[in-house]
Structures are given as structure tokens and as C-alpha cells.
Image (cartoon, rainbow, N blue to C red):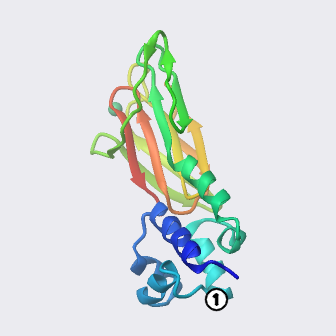
């Protein structure tokens, strides 16, 4: 017997990780927000056709929605979303760490960066090219001031790409489901935008 209330909590977490409301999920599936709410409170479970649409919306496998091993899913997904970003001001190294750690670089203890909403001097333009996502920044790429990395975080996926000074302020990633995109400026810190 499936534990529907646990499944429901799982679905809610997947939805929140994507930054979607119940209504937005419902609209994408062509159903009512009330149905989504029922699933999340364990008073129902998506039928076969909804499971594949839901998996597509959340960017996870159908198996992940169906699996009985919710704990494993949660641990993996939770760790990914607890990723912390560090930037050493002395040597310019970036670090990404899942969970709690003490990070020392160049003899200094680093503090995790907190992400700000992208501002008018840190704009990322996203466009989809077939199976890829093309991200372009309108930003300096000088040695003193550049975008140093881009990280996409979805429910159970994390993709990181590094950028280098004196090169294009643009990068291609595999096409990704809705999630958070982080990028780091060597002078102004970490920024975030929601994709999809
Ligand atoms: Fe900047």
C-alpha cells in the first residue's frame, strides 16, 4: 500500500523546488489546482497520464514520482538544495559544498555567499536552442571583474559550469527543467534567477 500522505509531501517539495504554485502546475497539466492540492495532502494520487506530465514539469523521472523509497529521494534532493557557494577573495577560487562545512582558503575562513536577485548590472538572458540552454550575461569579463560560474539547481539535478575572464560572457548548458540558476560575479557576489 502506498503511503499517500508521504507521497503528497514529496510532490509538494518537488513543486516548491521548481518555484511553482499549485495553480501553475495545474495549468500545465490541464487540471484544477484542487486536484494538485488533493495529491499533496494525500487525498489522491496522479493517474498514469498525469504522472508523466508531472515528471516533465518537475524535471524528474517518472520513477522518482512512483518510487516507494521516498527517503532516499529526499536525502539526495535535500542535499542538492542545501548547496552553499563560496568565493575566495584572495585567489578567486570558487567552491560549492553540499551541507555544513568549514571552508578555509588562502588562510581565511570563507563565509557562504547569499544569493541576491539578479539586478540591472547582472542580467542573464536565457534562450533555448534545441536541447541546450544558452545563457548570456551582459557583464564585464575582465580579470578584475567577471562572471566566474553558473550553477543550475533543480529538484534532483545540479549542473555547474565555469566561465573565464577575457572570454565570452556566455555559456551553454544542457536544457534543464524549471529551477534556480545561480551565477557569481567576482566583485558583486552571487545572483539567482528562476528558469523555465
Ligand atoms: Fe559584477
* Number of marks in the rendered image: 1
Q: What crowding class fits label 1: few (fewer than 14 Cα within 10 Å), some (14-19), or many (20 or more)? A: few
Residue at 42% x, 89% y: name it: 34
Residue at 46% x, 29% y: name it: 86
Q: Is residue 169 visible?
A: no
Q: Is residue 78 visible?
A: yes
Q: Position of residue 94 (x, y in %)?
A: 51, 27
Residue in the foreground of this view, choosing between 119 and 136: 119
Question: Image height check: is 111 above or below 90?
Answer: below
Q: Position of residue 66 (x, y in %)?
A: 69, 74
Asked if the beta carbon under badge 1 is closer than 8 A to the nearest atom of ligand 1, the reply is no
Question: Image height check: is 72 above or below 14?
Answer: above
Residue in the foreground of this view, choosing between 131 and 76: 76
Q: Residue furthest top?
A: 107
Q: Which residue is mark 1?
A: 47
- Quarter of the displayed picture in which ligand 1 can be seen: top left
Residue at 39% x, 19% y: name it: 144
Question: Image height check: is 13 above or below 172?
Answer: below
What secondary structure is found at the residue carrying circle 1? Answer: loop
Q: Is 49 on the left or on the right of 96, as rendered?
A: right
Q: Residue furthest left?
A: 120
Q: Is 99 on the left or on the right of 139, as rendered?
A: right
Question: Image height check: is 48 above or below 81?
Answer: below
Q: Position of residue 46 (x, y in %)?
A: 60, 85
Q: Is 85 on the left or on the right of 113, as rendered?
A: right
Q: Position of residue 1 (x, y in %)?
A: 70, 82
Amino acid at each position: 500500500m502506498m503511503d499517500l500522505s508521504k507521497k503528497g509531501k514529496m510532490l509538494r517539495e518537488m513543486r516548491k523546488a521548481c518555484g511553482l504554485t499549485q495553480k501553475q502546475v495545474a495549468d500545465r497539466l490541464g487540471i484544477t489546482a484542487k486536484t494538485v492540492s488533493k495529491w499533496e495532502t494525500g487525498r489522491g494520487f496522479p493517474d498514469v497520464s498525469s504522472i508523466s506530465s508531472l515528471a516533465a514539469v518537475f524535471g524528474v523521472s517518472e520513477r522518482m514520482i512512483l518510487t516507494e523509497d521516498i527517503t532516499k529521494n529526499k536525502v539526495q534532493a535535500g542535499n542538492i538544495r542545501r548547496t552553499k557557494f563560496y568565493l575566495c577573495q584572495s585567489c578567486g577560487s570558487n567552491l560549492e559544498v553540499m551541507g555544513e562545512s568549514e571552508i578555509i582558503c588562502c588562510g581565511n575562513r570563507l563565509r557562504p555567499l547569499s544569493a541576491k536577485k539578479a539586478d540591472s548590472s547582472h542580467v542573464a538572458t536565457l534562450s533555448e536552442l534545441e536541447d541546450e540552454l544558452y545563457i548570456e550575461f551582459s557583464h564585464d569579463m575582465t580579470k578584475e571583474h567577471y562572471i566566474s560560474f553558473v550553477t543550475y539547481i533543480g529538484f534532483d539535478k545540479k549542473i555547474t559550469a565555469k566561465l573565464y575572464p577575457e572570454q565570452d560572457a556566455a555559456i551553454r548548458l544542457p536544457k534543464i527543467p524549471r529551477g534556480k540558476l545561480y551565477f557569481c560575479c567576482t566583485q558583486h557576489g552571487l545572483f539567482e534567477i528562476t528558469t523555465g
